[in-house]
Image: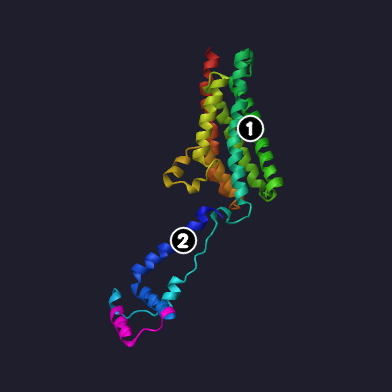
Amino acid sequence: MSLGDRIAPQMVYGLLQKVAMTAAPDLMMQSGIAQFEQHAGSLTPSQRQAVDTWLPRLKPDGSAASTAAGSRGAMGMAIDTVDVMRKGNSESLISFYAAGIGVMFLLFSVSGASGSLLDEVDNGTLDRVLSTRVGMTGLLTGKWVFIALTGMLQLTVMFLWGKVAFGLDLFHHLPGFAVMTAFTAAAAAGFGLLLATLARTRAQLSGMGTIVILTMSSLGGSMFPRFLMSENMQKLGLLTFNAWALDGYLKVFWRDAPIWQLWPQLLVLAVLTGVFLGLARTFAWRWETA
């Protein structure tokens, strides 16, 4: 059990006790008197008369005080601690970590694979390709398809490892997993090509890619759950690729959502794919004019 699990019930009980004391002081007084009589003996007639005189004054409307039994019932309420991270399927934590780590390392992989474009610039292959009918658009499209298929294979291997080693219920979520993996890999491949067309050298691509990917992963929830962040940080995380990919995978594995409920995440990933590829094609123009 984590430290938060030990502290949270006590904090909630303290807050409930504060509300009970301020909202129903007569009940608290009756409860205290009942405990006193249990351990120290019954009140004397004069003490009982004094208590009966003060109790009505504690009520906001001046009505008669409630009974001690009602107080014990109010303050004896049980606090049910629910582990949010494990609510639902027992492998929900595994699915969360598989998706978070899988998406983050997918971005690193596509960034490295897209660097082949820079290698072709250095060895002169790009000039020969551009002199053919393939053109820059055809070249980027071919690389995007290849990198996207490689990314799909990588995500599949990672989730299969989660199934074999940690018991992730993958086969019962195959349709949703397949759709999310296809859209995620497609968007990630476009992002990798965008980084490659922005960079001038392999070293520049590596440094820039590491900073951007780690920043996106930290804000998007790959390193730390977004639902445990502040509200402002959660909204900021929606600006990252990781957040939408992770939300889609969690809908599939955590909430058992059908495919049609994935449309917000799929729509955003599809739009990001188009934006990334469009920007990559724009920045690649410099090689055609060189």
Whether tag 1 and tag 2 are in contact, CB under 8 A, the answer is no
Judge from the rendering whether residue 21 lies leftward or rightward of residue 245; answer left or right. left
What residue is rendered at 59% in x and 28% in y? 111
Could you tell me which quadrant the N terminus lies in?
bottom right
Between 266 and 85, the one nearer to me in the picture: 85
State the image coordinates of residue 208 (x, y, percent, origin top left): 52, 26
Judge from the rendering whether residue 228 lies leftward or rightward of residue 248; answer left or right. left
State the image coordinates of residue 105 (x, y, percent, origin top left): 60, 35
Is residue 122 something one can see in this rendering?
yes
Q: Which residues are magenta?
A: 39-55
User: Label 2: which residue?
Assistant: 10
64 drawn magenta: no
Secondary structure at badge 1 equals: helix
Q: Amino acid at mark 1?
A: Ala
How many marks the image carries: the answer is: 2
Between 92 and 186, the one nearer to me in the picture: 92
State the image coordinates of residue 121 (x, y, percent, origin top left): 60, 15
Q: Is residue 242 above or below residue 251?
A: above
Q: Is residue 232 above or below residue 42?
A: above
Q: Main secondary structure of the magenta part?
A: helix
Q: Quadrant of residue 98?
A: top right
What residue is rendered at 51% in x and 31% in y? 212
Q: Is residue 41 above or below residue 174?
A: below
Secondary structure at badge 2 equals: helix
41 drawn magenta: yes
User: Label 1: which residue?
Assistant: 148
